[in-house]
């Protein structure tokens, strides 16, 4: 079946602009996670949704970052007033439930802020 | 912060067993050991997990020491497609997020 998909695959934006990154989880998966990966580092947790609600947003670096999942499926990560330090690969993952052993990751969106 | 220590890189000859070590000396009784890998330009992929018994699946085997302070992931017959960064993670079973470290970059040599 279809895996986790993310769009766009690449996004280049200018410093100060607003961007939206989309994640389509595996159908039926109730848990959805966003991670950020800088070059040479492991993925870093940002936020976790159980259904429509953000169950843990402790990884969001500041209030420029916001994520939504209004219908409990697709999620959008929103970044306001982008900075060059926001450049990274943004990964989305989903799992059947919060207690599932396995998280399924998408291919990521590479964000470059110039 | 990641609760595991892994070597930054390893080499293994194609067709041989790849043994990837991981130290997790501060692991708690309710924490599982998970392994994920990340092939270049892809998202991480789950490999295996265990609590205290050794585990095996179609991808790999996981050997956990009796004191649970370290473990080894074994890829029995490494192929070029196993070239990736391998992450060892400790995670409470019912927790949500995964805390990744820097992992081990495994190079499979032809």
Image: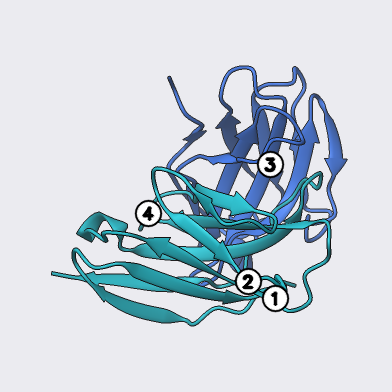
Q: Which chain is cyan?
A: B
Mark 2–mark 1 CB contact (< 8 Å): yes
Mark 2–mark 3 CB contact (< 8 Å): no
Look at chain A in the picture and name its colour. Answer: blue
Residue B69's label in the rendered image is: 1
| Disc 3: which residue | A33
Mark 1–mark 3 CB contact (< 8 Å): no
At label 1, counting other C-alpha atoms closer than 10 Å, the crowd grade (few under 14, some 14-19, many 20 or more) is some
Same chain assignment for discs 1 and 4: yes
* Distance between the alpha carbons at the discs numbered 1 and 3: 28 Å
* Distance between the alpha carbons at the discs numbered 2 and 3: 31 Å
| Disc 4: which residue | B41
User: Could you tell which of marks 2 and 4 lies nearer the N-terminus?
Assistant: 4
Same chain assignment for discs 2 and 3: no
Image quadrant in which you'd find residue B71: bottom right
**Please, which residue is most extreme toward the left here?**
B110
At label 2, counting other C-alpha atoms closer than 10 Å, the crowd grade (few under 14, some 14-19, many 20 or more) is few
Q: Chain of mark 1?
A: B
Callout 2: SS? loop
Q: Give the residue displayed 72% in from the left and 32% down from the top.
A: A31
């Amino acid at each position: 079946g279809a895996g986790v998909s993310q769009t766009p695959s690449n996004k280049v934006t200018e410093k100060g602009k607003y961007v939206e990154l989309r994640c389509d989880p595996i159908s039926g998966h109730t848990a959805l996670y966003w991670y950020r990966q800088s070059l040479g580092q492991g993925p870093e947790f940002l936020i976790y949704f159980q259904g429509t609600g953000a169950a843990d947003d402790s990884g969001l670096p500041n209030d420029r970052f916001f994520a939504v999942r209004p219908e409990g499926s697709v999620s959008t990560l929103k970044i306001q007033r982008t900075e060059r330090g926001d450049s990274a690969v943004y990964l989305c993952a989903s799992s059947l439930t919060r207690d599932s052993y396995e998280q399924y990751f998408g291919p990521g969106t590479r964000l470059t802020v110039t | 912060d990641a609760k595991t220590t892994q070597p930054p890189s390893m080499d293994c000859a194609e067709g041989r067993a790849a043994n990837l070590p991981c130290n997790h000396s501060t692991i708690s009784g309710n924490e599982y050991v998970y392994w994920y890998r990340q092939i270049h330009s892809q998202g991480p992929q789950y490999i295996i997990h265990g609590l205290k018994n050794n585990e095996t699946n179609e991808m790999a085997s996981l050997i956990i020491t009796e004191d649970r302070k370290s473990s080894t992931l074994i890829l029995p017959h490494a192929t070029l497609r196993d070239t990736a960064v391998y992450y060892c993670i400790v995670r409470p079973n019912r927790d949500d997020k995964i805390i990744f470290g820097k992992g081990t970059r495994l190079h499979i040599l032809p």
